[in-house]
Amino acid sequence: MSTVLKSFEKWKTFLSDRVQQAHNAGMSDETISKLAVQIGEFLSDKIDPENKEERILKELWDVADDGEKQIIARLMVKLVK
């Protein structure tokens, strides 16, 4: 996954593919959004941002409360649809 994180465009493509796979597997938008929050937590805690876009997202994530994190996650899913 590290090569995916080097380019924000590659990350968006990767995320878009995963969202499409989740939809094809029958997951609802709500379930996908909940998973996106969990992924956001993991990335924020464990992965060092590799480009300026990821750095901005991490900084926003780090100051967001739980409701705002849900919004960020939903917006990222919406962005790649």
Image (spheres, rainbow, N blue to C red):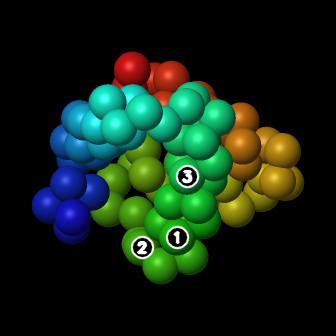
Front-most of residues 14 and 63: 14
- Asked whether the viewer can see residue 31, the reply is yes
Residue appearing at x 39%, y 20% in the figure: 81
Of the numbered discs 2 and 1, the one sitting upstream in the chain is 1
User: Given the image, on which type of amino acid does mark 2 rest?
Assistant: Ile
- Badge 1 marks a residue whose secondary structure is helix
Dot 2 and dot 3 residues touching (CB under 8 Å): no
Label placed on residue 42 = 1
Disc 2: which residue: 47
Judged from this view, the residue extending furthest toward the front is 26
Give x and y (percent) for residue 17.
25, 36
Dot 2 and dot 1 residues touching (CB under 8 Å): yes
Q: CA distance from mark 2 to mark 3?
A: 17 Å
Disc 3: which residue: 35
Q: CA distance from mark 2 to mark 1?
A: 8 Å
- Badge 3 marks a residue whose secondary structure is helix
In front: label 2 or label 1: 1
Neighbourhood count class around disc 1 (C-alpha, 10 Å): few under 14, some 14–19, many 20 upward = few
**Residue 51 sits in quarter:** bottom left
Residue appearing at x 24%, y 43% in the figure: 14
Residue appearing at x 63%, y 48% in the figure: 34
